[in-house]
Amino acid sequence: MGVVLDTCIIIASEKQKLNFDQFKDYGEVYISAITASELLIGV
């Protein structure tokens, strides 16, 4: 099983307010198409 990350989680990681290591136990990490487009556009 995996985990789907939302935009706010990825942004928090970029601002060094969150460490992705806590998601290792979930297996694979995914983002939705909406999250990908938000990150590309800069929402």
Image (cartoon, helix red, strand yellow):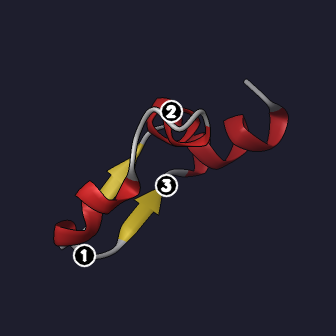
Q: In this view, does 21 lie to the left or right of 14?
A: left
Q: Which of the two labelled residues, at mark 3 and mark 2, occupies the earlier sequence position?
A: 2
Q: Quadrant of residue 2?
A: bottom left
> Which element is circle 1 on?
loop
Q: Tell me the number on the disc at residue 4.
A: none
Q: Tell me the number on the disc at residue 12.
A: 2
Work out whether 25 lies above or below 10.
below
The residue shown at (44%, 37%) is 9
Q: Where is residue 36 in the image (x, y as percent from the top left)?
A: 65, 49
Work out whether 39 lies above or below 29.
above
Residue under label 3, please give it: 31
> Which element is circle 3 on?
strand
* Farthest-out residue, right: 41
Judged by depth in the image, the label closer to the viewer, 3 or 2, is: 2
Q: In this view, does 39 lie to the left or right of 40?
A: left
The residue shown at (69%, 35%) is 38
The residue shown at (18%, 73%) is 1
Residue under label 1, please give it: 27
Residue neighbourhood size for the residue with mark 2, other residues' Cα within 10 Å, grouped as few (<14), some (14–19), many (≥20): few
> Which element is circle 2 on?
helix
Q: For the residues marked 1 and 2, what is the alpha-carbon distance in whole angstroms?
A: 20 Å
Q: Is residue 22 left or right of residue 34?
A: left
